[in-house]
Image (spheres, grey):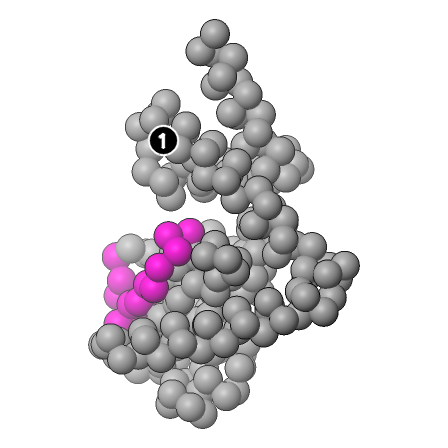
Amino acid sequence: MDVVDTLFGYSGAGLMFAEESKDLRYLVATDDRGRSLEGAQLHLGQGPCVSAYEENTAVTSSDVHADPRWPQLADRLHPEVRAVAGVPVRLGGAPVGTLNVYQSEPYDWDESDIQALKAYADVIEQLLTAAMAAEEKSALADQLQYALDYRVVIERAVGYLMGKHDLTAAQAFTGLRKQARDSRRRVADLAAEVLGEGAGGLR
């Protein structure tokens, strides 16, 4: 992660990856400030990096301490974590984690920043692909393959919940994930059950 700071001149960086439940987990950060950013978002289940993963797109904030999208985040952050950008790390087009960077002062991210981060995320994807090919039976490979194998089922369940309850995609996914976590079940298993109940209701 230090190479991201050196190459692009950011104050810090970190990586989060999804477990088989599709919940993000902290993997690595360059410093304590970066760890506060990762930890705060994981605790609250919200923030620019969480949104980047859930929406599968780059998400930025020029100053998270004043950003109305995540009002609870500032209280849990190191005071020198100000501007934040997150981009999804994908595998086969599906997000499996996020690459996150921050600046210690407010900063307006531009397209060159986003393109640079996306390019680095692509490098990470290539490394993951190579690692999976070499270590197919490793725990990381199993988790990443699970995300790919069950992505369609989960996305169909999210679509069903959106239509049934008039929810956004983010609301439907968050609700599905929370129910799975509360019942100690895998998201994919719950998604399949939701789809089964929906099909039964159509008979």
Is residue 45 highlighted in magenta? Answer: no
Depth check, front residue: 65 or 107: 107
Image quarter of residue 202: top left
Q: Is residue 47 visible?
A: no
In terms of depth relative to the viewer, which is nearer, 91 or 72? 91
Residue at 47%, 32% (x, y): give it.
157
Residue 104 lies, with reference to residue 48, above or below; the image says below
Counting the numbered discs, the total is: 1
The image quadrant of residue 76 is bottom left
Residue depicted at x 58% and y 74% = 127
Residue type beneath disc 1? Met
Tell me what residue is drawn at x 50 percent, y 76 percent: 123
Residue that badge 1 annotates: 162
Image: magenta residue range: 54-68
In the displayed structure, would residue 91 be above or below residue 29?
above
Name of the residue lying farthest toward the front:
133
Residue at the image point whose x is 31% and y is 74% from the top:
114
Q: Is residue 65 highlighted in magenta?
A: yes
Q: Where is residue 89 in the image (x, y as percent from the top left)?
A: 48, 65
Are there few (<14), some (14-19), or many (20+) residues within 10 Å of tag 1?
some
Label 1 SS: helix
Q: Can you see residue 80?
A: yes
Q: Where is residue 181 in the image (x, y as percent from the top left)?
A: 60, 40
Taking the view exactly as shown, the residue that stands out farthest to the top is 203
Q: In this view, does 155 lie to the left or right of 168?
A: right
Q: Is residue 72 found left or right of 197 in the rendered image?
A: left
Residue 133, percent across and down?
68, 66
The x, y position of residue 101, in whole percent, is 41, 76
